[in-house]
Amino acid sequence: MNIPPRLRRSLVRLRRDLLFMGAGLPLHAIPPVLFFWVLMQLKDIMGPGSDLGTLLLPFPVGLLLLAAYGLTEAQRWRFRSLCGMDLPRLRFRAGKRQWAYNCLVGPLLGLLELCVLGALAAALAAATSPVWIWTLGWQWRVDHRGYATPLGYATVGGLLVLAAVPALAGGLVRLENVVGRAVLDVSRSEELERRVEDLTVSRAGAVDAADAERRRIERDLHDGAQQRLVALALNLGLAKATLKDLPPEARQAIDEAHREAKEAIEELNSLVRGLHPAVLDELGLDAALSGLAARAPLPVRLWTDLPGRAAPAVEAVAYFVVSEALNNVAKHAAATRADVTVTRLGEILRVVVADDGVGGADPARGSGLRGLAQRVRSVDGAFRMSSPAGGPTTMTVELPCLT
């Protein structure tokens, strides 16, 4: 037998709605039963000559409090399995909303479910009354000759109610979905808090992924292109030293190629150190900053107080902050010296870079300083710059020292 698609969809929807109401009815009935039990124990306590109520009262009260929280998971399963609506897992501090739904709103919805399911059962009994009336025997029908008229009314009324049941059930299920989402869903503030937590985690993952990618590029450049350039420079140096009978033009070309190869090696070394210095992973931030200060084009006084290692991403940010700051001092500040102080104060890694230059540095006008500030904020750090005209310039960075 082929059932029309529209009728099949209606039957599937009605089956889902009836299962949803049938699963919700016992869940909504538990709190009223426990509350009635509490009232009975209170009545027993206030009665004369009875201590049993006092002893038994904590049990229904405890069960009622437990139901206010425990029934939420059952309701979440009901909404998810039968309606495809995934409600979030509420925290314990959202107990007021859980208690309001399970102990106040739920019983009212359960009463409506009971009315709809009761109307369905009565309508089925009335609509099928011509069938089961014959099971009473012919003697009953002879003794009640006027049964046909009320039986017909009952049958017609049952069919009308049956026709209305799908709409009633669907409306009640939609009402429960709206109420459930309004009461059991997370509030706006909780949703924003969760989004902030998710964004923080995803940002930390992005920072770690970018740091790992820089390390990979550094290794590839060091083990690949840099080694080839070194081999090229050695071959050119060997040719320059051994081939004495070449024309002057050829020797000049070899000299220029040798010089260009050595300059390319130096630039590649600077690029590799700028991406992620290997000494930062091997020996830590103190050793990496010492090498950075030694290579700086101006005198740098470095003072560090680092009792332990920080997270790799935080150490990388601190290193690149000092590196970029020293480059800016050498290029734009016209300074004669720079002071770098790196200390760990509890859970904060504090980096201070100061110079005696001309000042006037403004993060709003320099893309390099804006990039530094953005990189500091990527690990929830704080960036401050003090650079009045005429100097001195002081840059302070505070990073959360996560281990």
Image (spheres, rainbow, N blue to C red):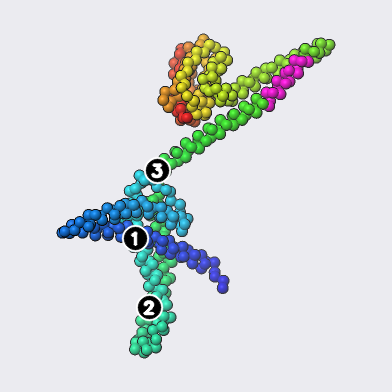
Position of 298 with respect to 164 (left or right) is: right
Measured as percent of width and height from the top left, residue 63 is found at: 32, 54
Q: Position of residue 40 (x, y in %)?
A: 24, 60
Q: Nearer the viewer, residue 392 or 309?
A: 309
Residue 375 seen in the figure = no
Determine whether the residue tagged by mark 2 lies in a helix, strand or loop.
helix
Q: Residues within 10 Å of mark 2 (few under 14, many from 20)?
A: many
Secondary structure, magenta segment, majority class: helix
Q: Which residue is mark 3?
A: 190
Q: Residue at x 47, y 24 (%)?
A: 308
Sequence-first disc among 1 and 2 = 1
Neighbour tally class for label 1: few under 14, some 14-19, many 20 plus, Cα within 10 Å: some
Q: Identify the residue position indicated by label 2 in the image.
A: 154
- Magenta span contains residue 236: yes
**Above/below status of 195 relative to 126:** above
- Check disc 3 and give the amino acid type: Glu
Q: Is residue 395 magenta?
A: no
Q: Position of residue 355 (x, y in %)?
A: 48, 14
Residue 326, how many percent across, how many down?
53, 17
Q: Which mark is residue 29?
A: 1
Q: Secondary structure at mark 3?
A: helix
The reply to whether callout 3 and callout 1 are in contact (CB within 8 Å) is no
What separation in Å lies between label 2 and label 3 (alpha carbons)?
A: 53 Å
